[in-house]
Amino acid sequence: MNTPSIRFDNGEAYEHATGVYSRLIGAVFLDWVAAAPGLRWIDIGCGNGAFTELLLQRTAPAEVQAIDPSEGQLEFARRRPGAAGAVFHRGDAMALPFETAHFDAAVMALVLFFVPDPARGITEMMRVVRPGGLVAAYVWDVPGGGLAIEPVRTALLEAGFEPPAPPSAAISAMPALRAAFTGAGLAQVETRRIDVERHFTNFDAYWTAALMAGGLGERVAELPASAVDAVRARTRALLRIDAEGVVIASGTANAVKGLVPA
């Protein structure tokens, strides 16, 4: 059976499903990266600009270029007030439209596991960053069950339905990330785990946001009504819900960073 793929073409939907998580992870990630101010950044797979906005707010960059294959995502990003100052381009992470060594830092935020050939994506990041510059990424830990929508995915699997998955999910395991960055020739490679929590007022709020994750809503819509009811009930049972009905949704991301050899 072919695993359905995750796609994000709607910037508004991405904001509700993933953008909040990306900023939560991104804040911890940028503190860990500890980049100097005044750098020239490229945000690869910028989506709707959630992490791009964070870069502008927290790093005092000299330049931010952002690239994504989805025009729908880019339209949202260009309207985001906090992302004013970044330049958004439509393009491919495996063939970046920039000169060699133009940037001081390259980053992929929740993106590397969407790149069909992650090794090539890392090589392109290195190509556009100057010697001594930073290459970094963070991704949901898919093999470790770290996706924030993991309860829905688990419920679908238990009901006999394959949930959507990123095409290169295996790269998101910590050993795979470290091996990929080291194997690409990056120096001083480091990794760390980032755990985040997001609160939803009730189960329906969580369910609505989860189904906005690329491909998941479409997958659930294909199911018979009885199966949807069973998946909802199992998802609820797998979640942490407090006495007031607030859902505490957790996720785990793996982060990696390294330097382009001088």
Image (tube, rainbow, N blue to C red):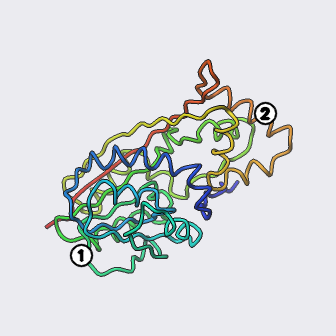
Question: Where in the figure is residue 123, as x and y percent of width and height?
Answer: 33, 69
Question: Where is mark 1, residue-wise?
Answer: 101
Q: Which mark is residue 71?
A: none
Q: Which amino acid does label 1 sit on?
A: Ala
Nearer to me, 105 or 164: 105
Q: Between marks 2 and 1, how big is the CA–CA gap?
A: 52 Å
Q: Which element type, helix, strand or loop, lies under badge 1?
A: loop
Do callouts 2 and 1 mark residues in contact (Cβ within 8 Å)? no
Residue closest to the far left = 262
Q: Quadrant of residue 175?
A: top left
Q: Exactly how many numbered labels are in the figure?
A: 2
Left or right of residue 202, residue 70 in this image = left
Question: Where in the figure is residue 50, as x and y percent of width and height?
Answer: 46, 56
Question: Where in the figure is residue 40, as x and y percent of width and height?
Answer: 26, 69
Q: Residue at x 58, y 55 (%)?
A: 14
Nearer to me, 83 or 189: 83
Q: Which residue is drawn at 29% across and 59% down?
A: 183
Left or right of residue 249, residue 225 in this image = right
Residue closest to the far right = 225
Q: How crowded is mark 1: few (under 14 residues within 10 Å), some or many (20 or more)?
A: some
Q: Residue 230 carries which label?
A: 2
Say above or below: 100 vs 73: below
Q: Which residue is drawn at 65% across and 51% down?
A: 212
Q: Quadrant of residue 203?
A: top right
